[in-house]
Image (cartoon, helix red, strand yellow):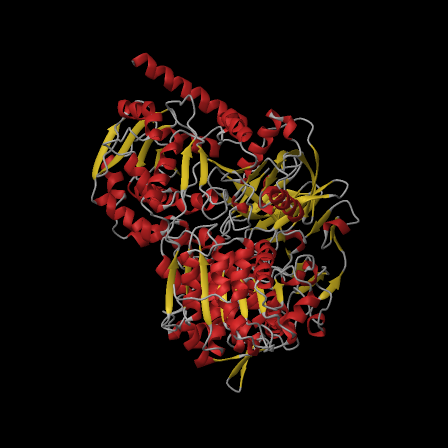
Amino acid sequence: MSITLPTSVKNFFLQKSWKPSSFQQKAWDAYLKGYSGLIHAPTGTGKTLAACLGPFIENLNNFSTVKTGPRLIWITPMRALASDTEKSLREICEGIGLPWEIKRRTADTSSRDRLNIRKKPPQLLITTPESLSLMLSYEDFEKRLKTTQCVIVDEWHELLGSKRGVQLELCLARIRGVNKNLKTWGLSATLGNVTEALDVLLGMKQIKQKKIISCDQYKKIDIVSLIPKKIERFPWAGHLGLRLLPDILEKLGSAKSTLIFTNTRAQAELWFEALLKSQPELVGRIALHHGSLDKSIRRRVEEGLKSGEFRCVVCTSSLDLGVDFSPVEQVIQIGSPKGIARLLQRAGRSGHRPGVASKIICAPTNALELVEIAAARLAFEKNLIEKRVPLRLCLDVLAQHCVTLATGSGFEEKQLFNEIQKTHAFSNLTEKQWRWMLNFITSGGPALNNYPDFEKVVKSNKLYKIKSVKCARLHRMSIGTIVSDSLMELKWIRGQKIGSIEETFIGKLKKNDCFLFNGKYLQLVRVREMTAYVKKAGNKGRFVPRWLGGRAPLSTELSSFTQALLSEPIDYTIEEIEAITDILKTQKKISVLPSSDELLIESCSSKEGRHSFVFSFAGRHINEGLAILSAWRLSRTQKDTFKVWANDYGFEILSLGQKAIDIRELVQALSIDSLLKDLIASINSAETSKRHFREIAQISGLIFTGYPGRGKLTRHLQASSGIIYDVLQKYDGDNLLIEQALEEVLVSEFEYKRLKKCLTDIASKKVKIIETSNFSPFAVPIWSERIRSQTVSSESWEARIKRMINRMEKKLTYNE
Amino acid sequence: MNNLQIKIFGEDLILDPRRAMVWPSEESIFISDTHFGKSSIFRKYGLQIPEGSDEEMLISISNLIKDYQLKRLFILGDFVHGALPEGDKFFELFNTWRRAHNHISVVLIRGNHDVDLQDLCLNRLEIYDRYMVKSAELVHDPASATKNVYVSGHIHPHLKFRSSQESVRMPIFWCSSKMLILPAFGLFTGGKNIELSYDEVAYAIFPDGSDIIKIS
């Protein structure tokens, strides 16, 4: 390597006994030669150092006293990460003797500090995409970016594929607009589409000198399954894995500290409670961490993890991201991780040090999940990791960005159009869409054209500027693209705060209902405005919260590996597959195991009606789409009522009428002809679009949600997005945001492209139709989940399914 | 159009799925919570909400008056959504409508949103805080009723029906032997889900305004 490090850097490394790895040196070299790029390396390999030292050395060599603006901007996706990042950057900075001022600017920063940062920016500014956007809404800030040398985006893979990423793309385009020499570097963990990730970060045809720096030495990760001693022949997802509690306890005993990841908050609550119940001596040494807990509780748990105070922390994806917990010795995943990248990310939480192997133990919640774990290991060995597909043409984000710029220094039409077209997200933006957008923020769109009182953005002297101080204030309050379910405060009757909880969840409860929260059984006493008051529950009703956004579908990559493992010929030498031999045998006995060029359809009768199960192995979203689509098509040719349900492996159509579903018609219903038209007609698109419109309305500035705690001032401006959707559709049918809502439904809820590909695949497969006398092991998970979703009390569905499975077992044994 | 005849506190009333109540013996029609001008207030604050709902509501009121041949219109509060900007289109719209319906009297029971009614409107509306029709007291907010029997608005009551797969929310007339709470007439309004107690009845309106059904 050609790079020679300055003496102070060498001494610092010596003192810390660090040895720069080759990818770090490559990154520094590339930076100092003027490149932009992406550093792609697994968690815990020293990405931060790889990214920051280039700019640091540049300034050590050539110290500038320019204080007009930040020299380096460090973007982090999470506020919680910002303080850790600041600490490690400061350590390096001071260690090598670079006298830089470092400051953080996030939503937590006080208003005095914010003003201070704007007026006297530090040399190194750490911030989030939202805060960066917000800073651009101040007139004096843009010119401060002219002397910025580099923007570094940490955890770029987390932003890519989301509207936050699009927002950042636009902000970066703006900075490049005023500063031609800006270098941009991204840091990304495991990702399937690295080249695309780089292109999105750097924009289209803007930066010629670009490089991808990969850590060639992939960290070793052991993916180990916890195989249950007894495996039932009919897998069902009933017990949330608690059956493996003794095995997990054993594992806890052998490690100094353990992180237990679950897929849902409800599962985290259950496990936390179960662990405490079986090992009461763990009180105080075990903690819970998930997104619904109060910030202060979460922070305390994070601190405790770092200091090694806790033996074990049960958590959800809330701890997936970067914070360094080097003391964690062991990571356990409950349930299938549903994605390879996610599993690797979680595995990376242990042995978070270069050169130390990571190990993740996966505990399946039902036996078929063993296959998914094996699939993840195979995919990892073949180096196949999920892609993050970047979003395009989010007009809501564009509208927000344009108003932001109008609030700041203002913008010129042509110049901004050119600038925006250089982003990946808007490279296909048409002149027509651009016109519509400008019209939308100035006169409110065609439907408002003659309304003189509309106030937002005005054009004067070529420059688009916000119309009033009032509008600027309202806009600044709503910058950002994170739209979550509104949260309610959870308090004891006496007023002490416990945490926050989704409004929709509380909405489902009645007075006196019990639920589990942070390991406590709570009983709802009353709801006042945005606060839910609870007391300790006396009798323990077994009611576990079912939070939103709990279950991620199996990723495309993982589905195809799973399908391959479950197709003939079966490879019984894989440990997990060997463990489920009984299940596969039973499947063969009742039905068949399809080979990879076959599509298996099982049909069977019960008291409920006629069941048809179709196994596409395409992941839950796709199967939901297929189920709704085919049931809708069937209902057009035959008068009947259908119930549908789907999981990652397949879907069920239950016909409640007497007449059996004609399987040939079912196969026809899976045709690709007029897919788009039929899909839109079948998904009750109005209702689903309305749900999606909520986010769009908030981002584009159609609804004003106000400041937390200042809601009342704007009471008269409150309307639900559903009502606005109705009004727009009725009186402004050409509104492009309504169109966007439908597109988002197709893309995000049904993954339209993947669905289309799946139907093409199905068309090329041999259809294998089996009439069964009993539900097969593949069918049972789908059926049992449908039963669960349809029964109200949680006790009864478990009992019912257990009973029915016992009956199936008996029938099978009898036949043997 | 399917309407429903009901008997409540000894009176024969008609519930119309266009979210209006008709009292034939009084030759009167009752609507509530129109929230006129709501979209212009939103626009004033830079939220791009199209107009059209105000006009549609006025047409709907005209049709109701024509269909039932009535002499009096009662609006049970929240006639406007808030102080409208001077010269707002709604004033002209409403004046034109009022001229075309000179023969009927319009009574407004003042609602919490009706704080700043322009003179223009005042001339054409009789405004009261409460008003008696036979034994029933008309108020905006049911909490402010002083008599045993009352008709009110304010709540924008809705009922939510849930099946295993989906849920529907319908605006309702909320009744007991002593009260009748009207659904919001406004097209650009939301509402509150209520739970019926055993002695109450709801008349739920289909989302497309085509029908009305009794639920108890």
The residue at 38%/75% (across/down) is A431
Q: Quadrant of residue A417?
A: bottom left
User: Whole-percent x and y of residue A201?
Assistant: 42, 65
The percent coordinates of residue B132 (x first, y second) are 76, 54
Asked if residue A93 shows in the view, the reply is yes
For this view, does B189 lie left or right of residue A642? right
Q: How many marks?
A: 0
Closer to the camera in the image, A315 or B177:
A315
Q: Residue at x 60, y 42 (%)?
A: A305
Residue A277 to residue A70: above or below: above
**In this rendering, does residue B63 appear at all?**
no
Question: In the rendered image of this protein, does residue A782 appear above or below residue B152?
Answer: above
- Furthest residue in direction bottom, as rendered: A461
Looking at the image, which is closer to me, A363 or A681? A363
Residue farthest right in this picture: B146
- Image side of residue A551 versus residue A303, left or right: left
State which quarter of the image contains the N terminus of chain A. bottom left
**Quadrant showing the C terminus of chain A:** top left
**In-image side of A326 versus A511 (left or right):** left
What x and y, as percent, mark residue A538?
69, 28
Q: Nearer the viewer, residue A348 or A738?
A: A348
x and y percentages locating residue A480 in the rendered image: 55, 62
